[in-house]
Image (cartoon, rainbow, N blue to C red):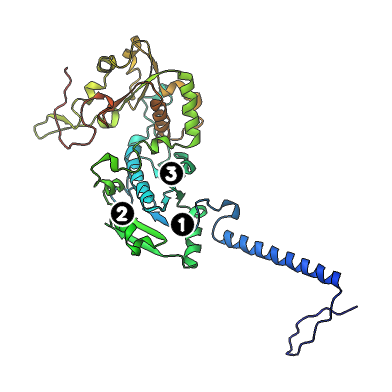
């Protein structure tokens, strides 16, 4: 039998003895198989080292460029030690998403959202404890529990700022020399797109306005210039929230809806003469049942099913409307909501979907000129404190 050839530690070499044809073919196949396995193992180890398995490689192309605004919405800035309500944070998030869309970059979204204690009272699902004002225990929630990230990515590619989503991709790309990080502040999105100093960077790390992220979009004077509609994020809730809203809408059948925001907006303060003043002087009056009934009579006929979404906690507050309408609240659907709702932000997202499905929807205050509203006070904060009005 021939002795297999091997390289020894010396400098001399011997010519290998020829193998029979069949054995040579077998050796070649075996060697190729071993090399293939080693390559696969090496590839797998590389991905494992970067923090995710090969099966979870993000479909949003590792060769793309990224836009990062911060680890939390509106932070860095004055909101790092506190956080605003859902609507405020959505305005900021939409602004960041718009910039990513404009720059054709993948947006690195914060993996958590801060929950404001002011807007996170728990008792609304269960009307039996509505006056106790319990709070949800958590002050943060996973972004994926609020939004469908894959659904958002059909319009604006998004990854979450966790190891499985983008740290590995950025680390690998940087090692391969595919670009570097551009730290920017006070730079317009047009310059980010046109200046090679920024446009060629793998990652643009923007420090947004310390007042709020959405201040970066304040220079737009026309709504037509907005790349993402104001309704974009409200239509992107997580799947379990969409399913819950769909079930409730099926039970309601054909219905109308009103959103009555009281609670946090009914804040008065006394001037130096001791006179009560408010930023929304007509709101308290216009959101009381007797005034609501008078206001919506021209839009919603008697006998209709009326879904009411409100942060008013007083039990039976809207009962006077029951002599004209069949009233429905979130608390009527606790069997559907309790298994999926973990905070008040999720609850409002479900209620918002329900209100969007109404035949007639009346808001608390107008956002657009075409909106129907209970109160004519401007929604935007005018900083003008006026004496509240309670008479007609």
Q: Residues within 10 Å of mark 3 (few under 14, many from 20)?
A: few
x%, y% of residue 132? 37, 27
Q: Could you tell whether 64 is left or right of 274 in the image?
A: right
Q: Quadrant of residue 269?
A: top left
- The kind of secondary structure element at disc 2 is helix
Q: Could you tell whether 200 is left or right of 293 in the image?
A: right
- The kind of secondary structure element at disc 3 is loop
- At horizontal 39% and vertical 62% (from top left) the residue drawn is 201
- The kind of secondary structure element at disc 1 is loop
Measure the C-alpha gap from mark 2 to mark 3: 19 Å
Task: Look at the numbered discs 1 and 2 and tell me whether their residues touch, using CB distance below 8 Å.
Answer: no
- Would you place residue 179 above or below residue 160 in this image? below
Q: Which mark is residue 354?
A: none
- Circle 2 is placed at which residue position? 189
Q: Could you tell whether 107 is left or right of 35 in the image?
A: left
- Would you place residue 232 above or below residue 257 in this image? below
Q: Quadrant of residue 179?
A: bottom left
Q: Residues within 10 Å of mark 2 (few under 14, many from 20)?
A: some
Q: Which mark is residue 155?
A: 3
Q: Quadrant of residue 328?
A: top left
Residue 337 visible in rendering:
no
Residue extending furthest left? 273
Residue 41 visible in rendering:
yes
């Amino acid at each position: 039998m021939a002795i297999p050839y091997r390289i020894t530690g010396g400098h001399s070499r011997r010519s290998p003895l020829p193998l029979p044809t069949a054995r040579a073919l077998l050796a070649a196949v075996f060697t190729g198989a071993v090399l293939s396995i080693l390559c696969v193992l090496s590839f797998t180890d590389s991905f494992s080292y970067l923090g995710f398995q090969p099966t979870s490689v993000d479909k949003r192309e590792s060769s793309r460029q990224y836009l990062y605004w911060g680890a939390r919405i509106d932070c860095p800035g004055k909101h790092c030690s506190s956080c605003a309500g859902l609507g405020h944070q959505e305005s900021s998030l939409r602004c960041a998403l718009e910039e990513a869309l404009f720059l054709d970059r993948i947006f690195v979204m914060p993996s958590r959202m801060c929950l404001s204690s002011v807007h996170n009272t728990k008792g609304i699902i269960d009307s039996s404890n509505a006056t106790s004002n319990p709070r949800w225990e958590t002050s943060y929630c996973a972004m994926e529990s609020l939004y469908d990230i894959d659904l958002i990515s059909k319009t604006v590619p998004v990854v979450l700022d966790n190891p499985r989503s983008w740290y590995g991709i950025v680390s690998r790309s940087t090692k391969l020399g595919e670009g570097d990080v551009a730290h920017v502040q006070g730079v317009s999105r047009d310059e980010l797109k046109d200046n090679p100093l920024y446009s060629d960077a793998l990652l643009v790390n923007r420090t947004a306005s310390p007042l709020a992220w959405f201040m970066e979009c304040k220079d737009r004077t026309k709504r037509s210039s907005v790349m993402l509609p104001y309704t974009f994020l409200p239509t992107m809730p997580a799947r379990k929230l969409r399913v819950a809203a769909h079930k409730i809408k099926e039970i309601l059948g054909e219905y109308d809806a009103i959103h009555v925001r009281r609670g946090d907006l009914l804040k008065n303060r006394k001037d130096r003469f001791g006179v009560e003043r408010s930023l929304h002087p007509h709101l308290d009056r216009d959101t009381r049942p007797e005034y609501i009934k008078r206001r919506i009579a021209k839009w919603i006929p008697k006998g209709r099913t009326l879904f009411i979404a409100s942060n008013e906690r007083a039990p039976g507050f809207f009962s006077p409307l029951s002599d004209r309408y069949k009233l429905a609240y979130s608390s009527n659907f606790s069997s559907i909501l309790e298994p999926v709702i973990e905070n008040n932000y999720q609850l409002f997202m479900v209620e918002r979907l329900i209100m969007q499905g109404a035949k007639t929807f009346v808001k608390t205050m107008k956002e657009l000129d075409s909106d129907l509203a209970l109160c004519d006070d401007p929604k935007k904060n005018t900083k003008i404190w006026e004496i509240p009005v309670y008479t007609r």
